[in-house]
Amino acid sequence: MTRIFDFNLVHRDGDARVGRILTSHGVVETPVFMPVGTQATVKAMTPEELTQIGSTMILANTYHLHLRPGEQVVHAAGGLHSFMNWNGAILTDSGGFQVYSLAQTRKITEDGVQFQSHIDGSRHFFTPERAIEIQRALGPDIMMAFDECPPVESSREYLQQANERTIRWARRCRDALQEGDPTLFGIVQGGLHKDLRAKCAEALVELDLPGYALGGLQLGEDKDQFLEMVSHTTPLLPSDKPRYLMGVGTPLDFLETVERGVDMFDCVMPTRAGRNALLFTRCGRMNIRKAEFTNDMKPVDPECGCYTCQNYSRAYLRHLFVAQEILAARLATTHNLFFFIDLMARIREAIRSGVFQQFKREFLTRYLNPNSGAPHTTPATCCRRSRNERPVFDLTNETPSCE
Ligand SMILES: [Zn+2]
């Protein structure tokens, strides 16, 4: 099959950018948030529901799908898109991060990483070539180079070795490409060392890959260090190619790093938090299990246009969580994902209108508690309107790709 991949920058406002990624499975407007579909499913959501809330690209995990059900099963089904019935774009990670964070007894050599499955202890060996082969069988639109992602607290000496290996492995991934393969992105590592990040970025840019990711961040470093690394790395990457900040983050992270030129994000935050009763709103985050919501008949976020907020009250959601009903996870995930995807749409609109800084300021004024600098934990101050006062909202017109 002939694969389509193209990236066009549409608008800039400072270093913040709006772009369009053209794939064989539709147009993805950036900045984009990709819901995480680890096991070829975004937990609690059907693909139709993802489309309805405006999702255009999701992420799936090579490590997990290799272990279960095995890439050959997915390949026999016609690839991930038909296996999971998702017609939007898909990005697969290379399995690198999970090999280091989940697998047991791993052994890293120049050739690759030998590890034991966290599920059944079975032995596996990932090399750069093998990671490409598995991703080829899964058949996403974008695949990631196999990298080494050492713990942030590793010694500089080790980080340097791992960095050199990541560069050599990226070259091997590029060399393993075949006609018709998914588009390969490289991953810039280097821990919190600017010179290592620069070296990695420079070497990967030489490979002239269609896109680049920032890996190994938000693994325990403080916020200033994180933002400093992003500020340092994005200018080293070509401005005409997408930049993907892996595993990040929160609404605050999006605003801070879009401002620094990042285009793509994925994170389990909205789905995982949703299943744990933590809901994102324009006025901070709320734990919907709290007793204060027992008789609260307002929607979760009175300004939100999602299915959950259009049809259900905080009291009902609290009841579902307390009673441990499955619908609780579905309604909470729907709201949180909509909130993240809609936030990206609003960010794109602000960039297009040249008012990104103003948008960021206004969003954070409501979202953060000025005393703590963290998100508000109760929605008391700015969610006063009742359901009947909400503006009429047509969900079907809210897909970012229709803006
Ligand atoms: Zn909502």
Image (cartoon, rainbow, N blue to C red):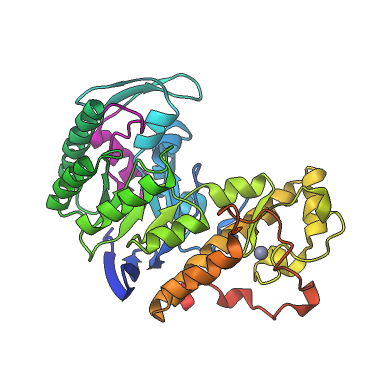
Residue 233 in percent (x, y) is at 26, 52
Image quadrant containing the N terminus: bottom left
Q: Is residue 392 left or right of residue 363?
A: right
**Farthest-out residue, front:** 371
Residue 77 in percent (x, y) is at 44, 46
Residue 228 falls inside the magenta stretch: no
Q: Is residue 266 left or right of residue 324?
A: left
**Farthest-out residue, left:** 206
The segment highlighted magenta reads: 126-155
| Ligand 1 shown in quarter | bottom right
Residue 25 in percent (x, y) is at 39, 63
**Farthest-out residue, right:** 295
In the image, what residue occupies the spot 72% across and 68% down? 383
Tell me if I can see residue 54 in this picture: no
Vertical position of residue 273 compared to residue 112: above or below: below
In the image, what residue occupies the spot 47% across and 51% down? 249
Residue 134 falls inside the magenta stretch: yes
In the image, what residue occupies the spot 16% across and 52% down? 205
Tell me if I can see residue 163 in this picture: yes
